[in-house]
Amino acid sequence: MRLKRNPQDILISRLYAANQDNICDHFLRLDVRSRRARFCGAVNDNGILDYARNIFRGDSIVCGAFVDGRLRGVVELHGVFQFWASKAEAAISVEPDSQNIGIGDALFERIIAMAQNRGVRNIQMMCLKENSRMRHLATKHHALLRSNHDAVDAVLHPYWPTLASVMKEVVGETRG
């Protein structure tokens, strides 16, 4: 069953340890193809649960996309709480039935604003060459793409914080 929604039906909110069960459930709902796309390889349920339980390591920001109160997508930004975090790594996952309704784009925009507001100068994302959706999102947001044998490396260069980027994050947190 594919969800049919408008982007305004998608609620993006920062996630915390209290959301741990929702995050585990989200990752477990990813099918084999979505897991391969997100983790750049095969991952079983135990591997998914181990990863999800450690998602809030000390240098991460995690946001989720909710549709009808259910977590349907997750974006992670790792490396933001290091001293002068000039580089960070991002990863996005969206459940198969929730793709193509704007969740990935909304998550991407939020994490770019959050990185921008923390002075991150380079956001790096890695995806498989076959992951056309992620490549499209990266290109849409002006990422530089570099290909190697199996993967594509996408690098974004956020601007310095602006009033608009700060307000986007504040309003998003208030709404969430």
Image (cartoon, helix red, strand yellow):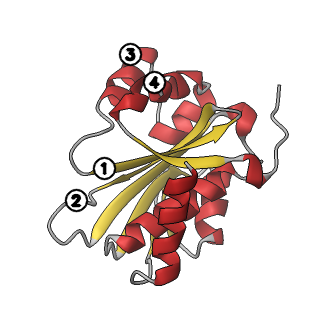
**What type is the residue that disc 2 sits on?**
Phe
Q: Nearer the viewer, mark 4 or mark 3?
A: 4
Which x, y percent locates residue 26? 54, 28
Task: Judge by depth and name the residue closer to the eye, 58 or 16.
Answer: 16
Residue 136's mark? none
Q: Is residue 15 left or right of residue 104?
A: left
Can residue 1 be seen here? The reply is yes
Residue occupying the point 26% across, 57% down: 79
Residue 24's mark? 4
Q: Badge 2 is on which residue?
A: 81
The disc, 1 or 3, on the residue closer to the chain's N-terminal end is: 3
**What type is the residue that disc 3 sits on?**
Asn
The disc, 2 or 4, on the residue closer to the chain's N-terminal end is: 4
**Picture mark count:** 4
Quarter of image, res 114: bottom left
Residue 60's mark? 1
Q: Badge 3 is on which residue?
A: 46
